[in-house]
Image (cartoon, rainbow, N blue to C red):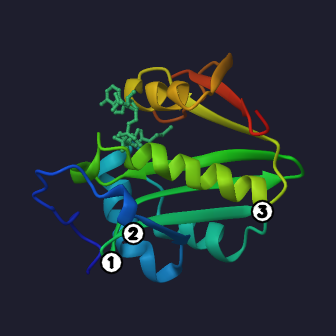
Amino acid sequence: MNGGEVRRARRSEPPALDRLRFEPMQVRDLDEVLAIERVSFTTPWSRAAYHRELLLNGCATYLVGRLDGRVVSYGGMWVVLDEAHVTNLAVHPDYRRGGVGRVTMLALEQRARELGARRMTLEVRVSNTPARRLYEKLGYRGTGIRRNYYTDTREDAIVMWKDLED
Ligand SMILES: CC(C)(COP(=O)(O)OP(=O)(O)OC[C@H]1O[C@@H](n2cnc3c(N)ncnc32)[C@H](O)[C@@H]1OP(=O)(O)O)[C@@H](O)C(=O)NCCC(=O)NCCS
């Protein structure tokens, strides 16, 4: 597909999580990833930013969740020693509220464990209730606030941690 609009699925059924497959993100996935990125974030990452992450950043791991061939979710992290720091997570708007975000985070956690991580951390905007609820449900606990963390809106971030060995 071209890099323009996010493709609409006209979904009425919950997504079939048993058919969701996770694979390392490749440069060829970026049209689909960026279409989701642009409708998901106030300040979306650019193609160049993803290129750097995929091709140059040795500690970065990105996964795409694919359902019947199309990318419906993705997430990424940096794994340094025994800590994994989540950098990004998004679900195609047509596939939200069906468990895809939860399963995508679980896939990231599993990959982090395989890479030797024992703890997972992330920042989330104070106003991002869907993401905060998702992380809390998965066992992440807020440990602090980073004031004015997001440079676009100067919004605060909540720092969350999860012990992957629990
Ligand atoms: C946050 C996001 C990834 C959640 O994906 P999702 O597939 O809708 O999440 P799930 O269906 O797995 O939801 C799991 C839990 O998260 C919480 N949740 C998800 N969306 C929610 C919403 N809109 N309102 C309140 N709680 C929500 C619920 O507790 C939900 O469990 P439940 O459905 O049993 O109530 C998705 O909304 C998204 O892509 N948002 C834009 C990008 C973004 O904010 N990413 C996070 C950056 S830190």
Q: Nearer the viewer, mark 3 or mark 1?
A: 1
Which of 142/68 is in front? 68
Q: Which residue: 76% across, 53% down?
A: 113
Tell me whether the residue at label 3 lies in contact with that at label 1, contact meaning CB atoms closer than 8 angstroms. Answer: no
**CA distance separating discs 3 and 2:** 23 Å
**CA distance separating discs 3 and 1:** 27 Å
Q: Circle 3 is placed at which residue position?
A: 59
Q: Is residue 133 above or below residue 73?
A: above
Label 2 is placed on what type of residue?
Arg
Quadrant into which the C terminus falls? top right
Label 1 is placed on what type of residue?
Gly
Picture quadrant where residue 163 is located: top right
How far across and how far down the image is residue 143, in percent? Answer: 71, 17
- Categorize mark 3 by other alpha carbons within 10 Å: few (<14), some (14-19), many (20+): some
Q: Which residue: 80% across, 60% down?
A: 115
How far across and how far down the image is residue 88, in percent? Answer: 54, 49
- Categorize mark 1 by other alpha carbons within 10 Å: few (<14), some (14-19), many (20+): few
Q: Which residue: 87% across, 47% down?
A: 82
How far across and how far down the image is residue 41, in percent? Answer: 38, 44
Q: Circle 2 is placed at which residue position?
A: 66
Quadrant into which the N terminus falls? bottom left
Q: Is residue 150 above or below residue 11?
A: above
Q: In which quarter of the image is ligand 1?
A: top left
Tell me whether the residue at label 3 lies in contact with that at label 2, contact meaning CB atoms closer than 8 angstroms. Answer: no
For the residue with label 3, is its CB less than 8 Å from the closest atom of ligand 1?
no
Query: What SS does tag 2 mark?
Result: strand
Tell me whether the residue at label 2 lies in contact with that at label 1, contact meaning CB atoms closer than 8 angstroms. Answer: yes
Q: Circle 1 is placed at which residue position?
A: 69
For the residue with label 1, is its CB less than 8 Å from the closest atom of ligand 1?
no
Query: What SS does tag 3 mark?
Result: loop
Q: Is residue 39 above or below residue 51?
A: above
